[in-house]
Image (cartoon, rainbow, N blue to C red):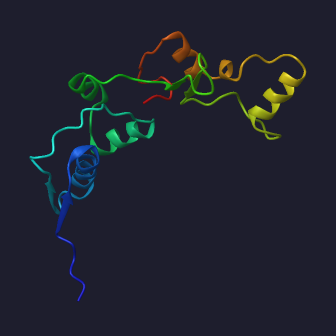
Amino acid sequence: MNKPVRKVVIAGGGTAGWVCAAALSSQLGDLLNIVLVESEDIGTVGVGEASIPPMRNFHRLIGVDEQQFMAATGATFKLGIAFENWARDGDRYIHSFGKTGKETWMADFQHFWLRAREQGFGGEFGEYCVEHEAAREGKFATSSNGSLNYA
């Protein structure tokens, strides 16, 4: 007895619950009755949310306008994640969302970069990534034909 699913109940709100409901509604809303149940007794955690670049694809999937979303939520764009005092006090590392260097049929970029460093030249690894350098300089802009990878 295979009955098609007609109703989906999402237990728990918060970011995960609402994102799940948005995705299901966007893709299967005509086929399903989607109900989100959340407790009135559990308040908002209020810690802020972080995202990574695939979130942009998710917004497109569910039909969210990025500029309107950013304005309505007071969100900020980011080109990577900065790790302060990660290895030692005063140390700072930016894990950028962009592609670093250019690979060839022979090897990925990091192999050429490491060889260059062995020979005394080549600069810092992040210098070969547009997103890293823009983040380091505090520069950012969106454009319909831009190629920056951001969240």
Could you tell me residue 143's position as x and y percent?
42, 20
Quarter holding residue 71: top left
Quarter holding residue 24: bottom left
As drawn, the residue found furthest toward the front would be 89
Could you tell me residue 108's position as x and y percent?
75, 37
Quarter holding residue 117: top right
Q: Is residue 103 above or below residue 120?
A: below
Q: Is residue 132 above or below residue 39?
A: above
Residue at 26% x, 36% y: name it.
Answer: 64
As drawn, the residue found furthest toward the bottom would be 1
Residue at 14% x, 55% y: name it.
Answer: 37
Quadrant of image for the N terminus: bottom left
Could you tell me residue 13's position as x and y percent?
20, 49
Quadrant of image for the C terminus: top left
Q: Which of 16/62 is in front?
A: 16
As drawn, the residue found furthest toward the right would be 119
Total number of numbered discs in the rendering = 0
In the image, taking residue 9 as reference, residue 144 lies left or right, namely: right
In the image, taking residue 49 as reference, residue 149 lies left or right, namely: right
Q: Which of 145/4 is in front?
A: 4
Could you tell me residue 115's position as x and y percent?
86, 28
In the image, taking residue 47 as reference, residue 79 lies left or right, namely: right
Q: Is residue 33 above or below residue 2?
A: above
Residue at 77% x, 36% y: name it.
Answer: 104
Residue at 84% x, 16% y: name it.
Answer: 121
